[in-house]
Image (cartoon, rainbow, N blue to C red):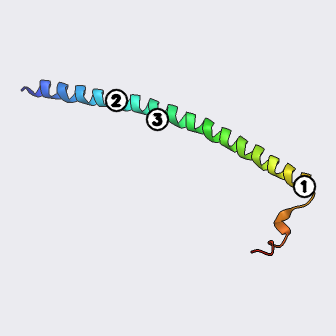
Amino acid sequence: MSHESELEARIVELETRVVFQDDLMGSLNDTVAGLGEEVAALRKLCTELRDAIEALRVGVGHDVAGEPPPPHY
């Protein structure tokens, strides 16, 4: 194998690797973006649940967190 054909084969191999890495980076970027959206949705849900729990506490009329445990404890 000549020196030029060996260099050409190495360049083709490197170009192939770069193409696969670009594809992988694009795929990973899409995954990260999707996870970011999922995290945002979960944060919103947590806020809504916290607000709902607070509304229930207010609806009961007092905060049971400050009460002593029942006698059977």
State which quadrant residue 33 falls in. top right
Residues at marks 1 and 3, CA–CA distance in whole angstroms: 48 Å
Q: Amino acid at mark 1?
A: Val
Q: Measuring from the top left, give residue 61's x and y in whole percent.
A: 93, 57
Q: Are marks 2 and 3 in contact (CB under 8 Å)?
A: no
Q: Secondary structure at mark 2?
A: helix
Return the residue nearer the eye: 68 or 21.
68
Q: Are marks 1 and 3 in contact (CB under 8 Å)?
A: no
CA neighbours of label 2 inside 10 A, class few (<14), some (14 to 19), many (20+): few
Left or right of 4? Residue 71 is right
Q: Quick one: label 1 or label 3, which is nearer the N terminus?
A: 3
Q: Quick one: label 1 or label 2, which is nearer the N terminus?
A: 2
State which quadrant residue 72 falls in. bottom right
Return the residue nearer the eye: 72 or 20.
72
Q: Which residue is mark 3?
A: 28
Q: Which residue is mark 2?
A: 20
The residue lying at 13 percent from left, 28 percent from top is 6
